[in-house]
Amino acid sequence: MPNIALTTQTHEKNIVMSLFQKLEYYIFCKKLNNSRFGTIL
């Protein structure tokens, strides 16, 4: 039983990590776009 609980915990951690990375990437892209538009304007 503890094994199953451990794998679920790791799996959940991985999901959170990937979500966080996507969020960071999204924010980074938005900043990049904003600065690009800033130079055009």
Image (cartoon, helix red, strand yellow):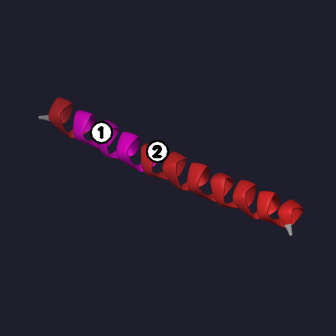
Residue under label 2, please give it. 17
Residue farthest along the bottom direction in this orientation: 41
Quadrant for the N terminus in the image = top left
| Magenta region, main secondary structure | helix
13 or 23: which is nearer to us? 23
Residue 33 falls inside the magenta stretch: no
Q: Position of residue 27 (x, y in %)?
A: 63, 58
Location of residue 37 with respect to 18 vertically, above or below: below
Location of residue 17 with respect to 35 vertically, above or below: above
- The amino acid type of the residue labelled 1 equals His
Residue under label 1, please give it. 11
Res 15 quadrant in image: top left
Left or right of residue 30, residue 22 in this image: left
Left or right of residue 4, residue 9 in this image: right
Q: Position of residue 29 (x, y in %)?
A: 64, 53
Q: Position of residue 9 (x, y in %)?
A: 30, 42
Left or right of residue 33, residue 21 in this image: left
**SS of the residue under disc 2:** helix
16 or 38: which is nearer to us? 38
Residue 15 falls inside the magenta stretch: yes
Left or right of residue 7, residue 20 in this image: right
Residue farthest along the front direction in this orientation: 40
x 53%, y 55%: residue: 23
x 26%, y 35%: residue: 6
Q: Which residues are magenta?
A: 6-16
4 or 36: which is nearer to us? 36
Location of residue 30 with respect to 12 vertically, above or below: below
Res 33 quadrant in image: bottom right
- The amino acid type of the residue labelled 2 equals Met
Q: Could you classify mark 2 by the number of other residues whose Cα lies within 10 Å: few (under 14), some (14-19), or many (20 or more)?
A: few
